[in-house]
Amino acid sequence: MPSFPFLLAILASSSFALPAADFSPALQWVKTLGGSGVSSVTAASADAHGNLYIVGNTTSLDFPANAAAQAIAGSSPLVRINSSTGALDKLHPAGVSSVSSLAADPRNPQKLYAASANGVFQSLDAGSTWNLLSLIPSSTTILGLTVDPSNGNTLYAATDTQGIFKSSDGGLTFAAINTGINPNSNGMINASRVWVDPQSPQVLFASTSDGLVHSANGGASWAAVGSFYSGNALSFDPFAPGTVYLGGGTLISKSTDDGQTFAPLSSLPDQAYPQALAADPLHAGVLFCGSTMGVYQSSDSGLTWVRKTTVSTSILAADPNSPVFYANSASYSMLKTADGFNTTSPIGPPETSLRQILVAGPNVFEVALPGNDVFAVKLDAGGNILYATYFGGSSDDSPSAMALGSDGSLYVTGSTMSADFPTTPGVYARAMPSDPGSPSSFVFKLNPEGSLAWSTYFAGVGNPVNAIALDSAGNVYIGGFSSGKLPTTPGAYQTDFQQSFFCTGFIGCFPGPTSAFATKLNAQGAGLVYSTYVPTDNKKNTVTVAQALAIDSSGNLWFGGQGNVVELNHDGSALLASTAQSGIAISALAFDSNSNLYAAGTFMPNYGGGPTPQFVFPATPGAFQPAPQPAIPNLTYQIPPGGYSDAFVIKWDTTLSHILAATLLGGELTDSAESIALDRAGNVIISGETDSKAFPTHAPFQTSFSPRSGFVAAFDPTLSQLLFSTYLGDTRPFDARAAALDPDGNVLVAGSTLSAGNLFIGGQPGQSFSVGNLVVANKIALQTAPAVRLDSVKNFASRLAVPLAPGEPILAVGSGFAPDAQLVIDGAPLAGFTGTATSLAAILPADAKTSGVYTIQVSSGGTLSNPVYVPAAEASPGIYSVDGNGFGQGYILNSDGTQNSPDNPAAPGSAITIFVAGQGPFSLDHGYAVTALAPSVYVEGFYCNGIAAVSGPVDGLPGNVYKLSVYVPDPAALVKNNPDLATFKFPPQVGVKLVMGPVSPQNPDSSPLVSQGGIVLNLK
């Protein structure tokens, strides 16, 4: 066995030279807000009384409005319109955040059925009130509801994963009816809609993942019509029993035998794709077809077609008792025609994208996708709601920034698609500047008690606002980016739009799409004081966006964006100073008492697939973190050193001439700072989000519980000392969007739990999280740090703050550890192996819990450290490295038992043995270690066939070590199954990953239980 570093040397390498902590954060309270929809935080701030103001957006119809300027949501998933008078009612069914489908009993149009998630609701008064009838299995979502035209007690539900269900008792119970429908490759049946022949109600059609299917017996069995068909383009001929029209591909087809066979009729002109078909109920042979090219009409039963409109249409609905048709419009509105689409007129509110139009008796209903509304909340110092309000119109409204007046007035800016966005008399613009279906920007002010002071539109499409600030007189400053048509004022710095340019070293320079802009409105929101483009700074650097604003004591406006900071004079006529720094995206700005400017945001070194970064961060001497960390090897298909981005803080002097201090803060993955605040001593508090498990923490109260966590941290004014740093959030991904300080120095944090999106591209592990679910506010007291401080608890092999598994060797890092120091887990001492004044190693019991939370402290000299909450897991794999840092040369043996190294590489196809910590519980079977979760090893993304695993002592490592032997993949042996590997050759150094349990097949790095990146295997 080769000689490796001894445990004490490994512990010494973990002894960071951290200064004494000034603070130990302690969670005081947690407040959650939301409802049945999705909600996310945009910004937050605190006033002089310790009240916390939070602004964001929500789709919830039951957001907890209180003392509200607008008590109900401006948008609604369901709108009822009287077809004769045009009078409308926005319906907000209790407990329903969205409606996926609506159906009416043809014999009683007052009786409606609505689908929401997996629930079926009923109304007996045309939608005014609703009650829940039944729930279909919770693992599915209802996409379409249909009522049998001959029997109002028979309903069909099409679902996204479980196929088709039928109810024969008016929706009280449902049973699956999928005989004859083939599931997809995942074993599921996706069905989006069911059609019932009004003249032969036993004849059904359904759109499924198996294509269009047909039933002649009320759904008892189904047969495929054709896999070419998908969508909503099907209609029954009301004058010819058994005749069905179908749109599929670019063809219109016809059946005269109730769908047993179909024959092609024609294609639409312009090769348009049919998206909706509707037969005229009053005129035989007349059909209408909606497509992306417009609405087409046929007067000869589908043989020929004439285009009637040019508006993209995917939904058509006919009034069975009048010549009126309804169609959706690309501009978020519904159109009405009474003359066969020769003329149309809009009807109803401009809702978000429509899902369905339903005519039921005297009413026509719009079923829309959930719409966003702005929300604004004020919490008192104890986290209680003082006011909570919606703000918005019928379509999507989203805030982008907020500012807080000294009196507690709240100013919000953002973007709206609503033509009926609430505005007030006498403001700058009451009418929407953009055409319907295009966004406009807005600014509004709420009084301290939550009532509306004023609200105005600002500019039309192409001028989104990203930031807002106030001066002492209450004038409002906004900034963003413009692609032209910005309202400007005479004498401003730049009144004409000038396209910026960007250049590449390969193909020259091109005009860029946007210019930054800055605008000042008066305190009443009634007019522009100045408004100007800022396409370049006074050094001719391109300026594309104003992302964050700050106003100095002279009334000058400072803004930061993508690599720029610019100072604009008090009347907006000249630039006073500027600086440019590549690789940074500024999210927030703040002045200290000496008028020095701090900026926080995200630094992206941009490796571009190469070994060296394109941008280098301008860290100052003594910076807490001068470069991305950890400095893992830059391996192919793996994350670069320090991940893709880090949070940063930069401090400039009053002229932007010199960087006085600059530091990064981040770990091995993606980290971003989103807010900044300064306390009375000039200490700098930032918050944001991190995917890293090596994120620097200092006297935290918790570690990371999720693939993405929030964080809040503080630096001293020189950015050389980390005063405290803690993760935030539970098992749900979390973004700590904003942090503010109350008068007592407590930190108030507002953020959002997030939902997962698609896998990252390019080998980046984890998932993307872009949709907020729940608003969370925290109050954190900053206490004096104890003499014994616990900074992190890590997997001993990976050196990452990941969940803890039974039998896992762990490393506690902090300060003040005396020779008698012990780890205390859930109140019970755990014997340590050895340690130093700043680190302590121990091993969890083999029977430790595999779920839930540990409370971990260090006991030393009769003193307990700050408690840290750490998640438990069934496995938490880490691969040992030779030098004990958790990355670099792996602790890997070649087939002959010698250490793998650049001078002693392994051959493809040969056996290797990796040394692992955190594999979880295992049993012994004839001397071999069999883990509860199956291990999977990957080399450069290639799966390694396993051999066996054993457990036993290893010189220099704590406890018994899990030693897993596998074969290195041999591309030459895989050519038969993958000819593309014929010329493939591994690079000399490749990455090794271990997954315990389920593996994400498309990207093993995104598996739930995966080892750290940056472990190197050398190959011949």
Image: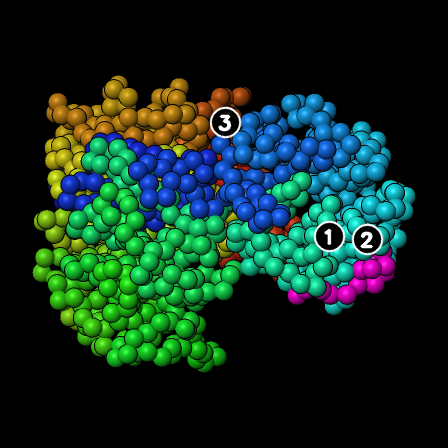
Q: Quick check: 706 above or below 531?
A: above
Badge 1 amino acid: Pro
| Labelled pair 2, 1 in contact (Cβ < 8 Å) | yes
Report the number of numbered marks. 3
Q: Which mark is residue 323?
A: 1
Q: Is residue 156 visible?
A: no
Badge 3 amino acid: Thr
**Residue annotated with mark 3:** 931
Which mark sits nearer the N-terminus, 2 or 1? 2
> Regarding mark 3 in the picture, which secondary structure is present there?
strand
| Labelled pair 3, 2 in contact (Cβ < 8 Å) | no
Q: Nearer the viewer, residue 261 or 674?
A: 261
Q: Is residue 52 left or right of residue 391?
A: left
Which quadrant of the figure has residue 885? top left
Q: Quick check: 618 above or below 533?
A: above
Is residue 235 highlighted in magenta? no
Q: Is residue 375 visible?
A: yes
Which mark sits nearer the N-terminus, 3 or 1? 1
Which mark sits nearer the N-terminus, 3 or 2? 2
